[in-house]
Image (tube, rainbow, N blue to C red):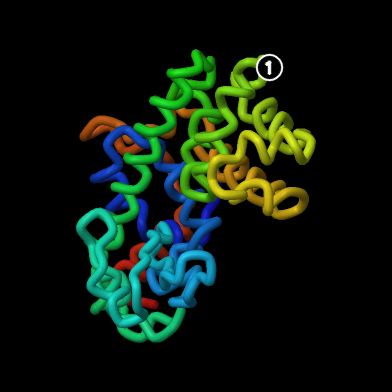
Amino acid sequence: MVFTPLVESWRPTLEQQANGIPINFLLAWLTHESGGNPCATGFVGKQDPRDGLFKFEAGIGQNFFEARSFDALFPTTSNGVTLAQLRKGCNGQTITNRSAVDDEAQVRAFLADVERFRDRSHQQLGAVGSQADAEELEDFWMFVKLQHALPAIPRFFLAAAAESGAADSFERFAGFVENLDLETMKRLDGSGGGVTIRRGATLAKIFNNARKTGAGSGANFFDFVAPSGTGGAFVVPAVLLVASLLLSKGGV
């Protein structure tokens, strides 16, 4: 796969810390969530009327933060990293000082989320005996990304999908959920309607995001980080490599 120079700039650090997670999956995640921009934001401190909490998504992997007030968001932690750490060198979604960006905190927060979602996917898929519970399959990584987009989907619908023979692939699972009638979906949706209210185009978009990111894992036998001295797991076109090096040295 070919990624933008900004996304590619994170490859060296991710390769050092990926812990067996396919590098192209991680880079595809960045592509769909932040574009590799450490200053990217999702929720931007708005108060959720459903629970009164203030929400914020930040960083290359779009870690989620919530607190009882806007000011309380910034010392709040995600995987031991504060929102304030992920906002260093940023003004809104603009990188104002690349050298001030805390790359270590960005990667640590991101990978800790992915590892947690990977473990949760193994638990859930294993519990229903799904054949998708294998890290050499792109389907598995699609389920992992789904944990970030809307974790209520696998949590509340996998068991029913397995009973219908629709849990052994991501496509069958997505089709099962999307084709549920409203009453059945409401009965299964233990997230307070979190899935039900996203029926239609929004739910399809969530599945498509997970689908595209999981497909970024590519031919997994080649995409895992290679042992030291083997030259790495992926050959980057020279022009992207040069651009990435420039970015990593403060060219943004």
Above or below, 196 against 100 in this view is above
Quarter of the image for the N terminus: give it: top right
Quarter of the image for the C terminus: give it: bottom left
Considering the numbered disc 1 on the image, is that residue within a helix, a strand or a loop? loop
Q: From the viewer's side, name the closer residue of 153 and 222.
A: 153
The residue positioned 43% from the left and 66% from the top of the image is 57
The residue positioned 38% from the left and 69% from the top of the image is 38
Left or right: 43, with 100 as reference point: right
| Residue 221 visible in rendering | no
Q: From the viewer's side, name the closer residue of 51 and 225.
A: 51
Report which residue position mark 1 lands on: 164
The residue positioned 34% from the left and 73% from the top of the image is 68
Query: Whole-percent x and y of residue 162?
Result: 60, 18
Query: Whole-percent x and y of residue 21?
Result: 36, 36
Using the rendered view, name the quadrant where residue 142 is placed: top right
Amino acid type of the residue that numbered disc 1 sits on in the rendered structure: Ser
Query: Whole-percent x and y of residue 105?
Result: 24, 62
Q: Give the tally of numbered discs.
A: 1
